[in-house]
Image (tube, grey):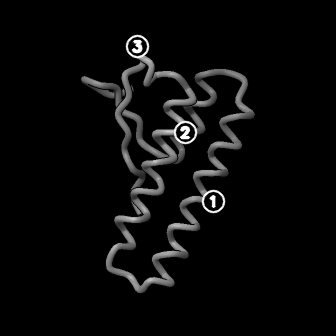
Amino acid sequence: MDKPTITIDPAGPGGNVFAVMAEARSAIIAAARKASFMKVREDREQNIAAAEAEAGGMMREVMQAHSYDEALGIIRRYVTIQEKGGSL
């Protein structure tokens, strides 16, 4: 599965690392739901649970970051981040 893409405004409240992390978490889970839409219920639930676990791991890593740039680097491993009006 391709990495989901999120768009943030680094100058606004959406540029806060916690807002970026939350947006990334939502995008990871939404991508799993979309990819699993036509699957059997059990497979769909497993895929969504795996995405939730992946997002949780990302969040734990981000919470251990020592800087904003390090946190964004971790988030970028899971999602593509675009800045409003261009790429970040």
The CA span between labels 3 and 1 is 30 Å
Q: In the picture provided, is 36 more to the left or to the right than 18?
A: left
- Figure quadrant of residue 72: top right
> Residue, x 52% and y 39% (percent of image)?
22
Total tally of numbered discs in the picture: 3
Give the amino acid at mark 3: Ala
- Figure quadrant of residue 54: bottom right
Horizontal and vertical percent position of residue 36: 39, 73
Label 3 vs label 2, nearer the camera: 3
| Secondary structure category for the residue under label 2 | helix
User: Residue 53 bears which disc, if any?
Assistant: 1
> Furthest residue to the left?
85
Q: In the picture provided, is 84 more to the left or to the right than 53?
A: left
Q: Is residue 60 shown above or below 43?
A: above
> Furthest residue to the top?
11
The CA span between labels 1 and 2 is 14 Å
The CA span between labels 3 and 2 is 18 Å
Specify the quadrant that holds the N terminus. bottom left
Give the amino acid at mark 1: Ala
| Secondary structure category for the residue under label 3 | loop
User: Residue 73 bears which disc, if any?
Assistant: none
Q: Which residue is mark 2?
A: 75
Q: Which residue is mark 3?
A: 11
Q: In the picture provided, is 54 more to the left or to the right than 26?
A: right
Q: Are marks 3 and 1 in contact (CB under 8 Å)?
A: no
> Residue, x 57% and y 67% (percent of image)?
49
> Residue, x 40% and y 16% (percent of image)?
12
Instruction: Estimate how packed mark 2 is, as few (under 14), some (14 to 19) or many (20 or more) residues with alpha carbons within 10 Å.
Output: many
Label 1 vs label 2, nearer the camera: 1
